[in-house]
Image: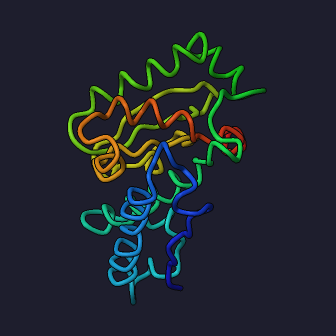
Amino acid sequence: MSIEPSPLPYDRSALEPHLSADTVEAHHGRQQALIEQVNAAVAGTELAELPLQEIVRRAQGALFNHASQAWNDAFYWEGLRPSAGGGGGEPEGRLAEAINRTFGDFARFKAQFAGVAERLFGSGWLWLLQRGDGALAVAATANAASPLTGEDTPLLACCLWEHAYYLDYRHARGKYLEAFWNIVDWRAVDARMK
């Protein structure tokens, strides 16, 4: 079985003005190369028939980096929705209740999310996670690391690699994070909760 790259769930310009079509195209275009590297590395091995997330859980070294980054990217795109199509705003229902229970309110959650992002040195990922007991947490992972290798359920990913924001925001990671909230698909995040 050959792994196929995930298509964008919307047009490449649909996230504008928060993420430009050029940024989306450059970022999403990397996934094809990552998937090709994964497919080449697993060909003829016991991993060849596994879905990408299982390869992430079992791989090490370069294969892990390529597989995890490809999975993280796909997860990131699936958690975004154009503002015009209902992205952004604030979560509702059980997700809003869980955020309020864990962080106090949505504003405090966003502040903690931004604080963790600003403390991450270099490239990586920012996650909203659900712990085994149902509580929520914010965590950062460096480089291609993914929560798939642990016990937490990933609910939302924010890419903190420079290719995710440099064309639009240069070195202003904080401005990228402010824009990010305008395109989060809270329905997708809620659907990932257990």
State the residue at coordinates (42%, 33%): 177
**Residue furthest front in the image:** 17
Direction from residue 119 to residue 47 in the image, left or right: right
Q: Is residue 57 above or below residue 167?
A: below
Residue at screen point 68% across, 29% down: 91
Instruction: Work out whether residue 96 can be spotted.
Output: yes
Looking at the picture, how far across and down is residue 179, in whole percent? 47, 35
Query: Looking at the image, which is closer to me, 49 or 168?
Result: 168
Comparing 192 with 57, the one in front is 192
Please identify the quadrant where the C terminus is shown. top right
The number of numbered discs placed on residues in the rendered structure image is: 0
- Left or right: residue 155 versus residue 168 is right
In the orientation shown, which residue stands out farthest toward the right?
93
Q: Going by the picture, which residue comes out furthest to the bottom?
A: 44
Would you identify the image quadrant in which residue 10 lies? bottom right
Image color mode: rainbow
Compared to residue 79, the image places residue 133 above or below, namely above
User: Can residue 194 be seen in this snapshot?
Assistant: no
- The spot of residue 122 in percent (x, y) is 21, 40
The residue at 36%/67% (across/down) is 30
Corner quadrant of residue 103:
top right
- Say which quarter of the image contains residue 102: top right
x%, y% of residue 48? 46, 82
At 37% from the left edge and 80% from the top edge, which residue is drawn?
36
Residue 168 x %, y %: 34, 46
Q: Is residue 84 above or below residue 36?
A: above
The correct choice, above or below, for 193 with respect to 146 in the image is above
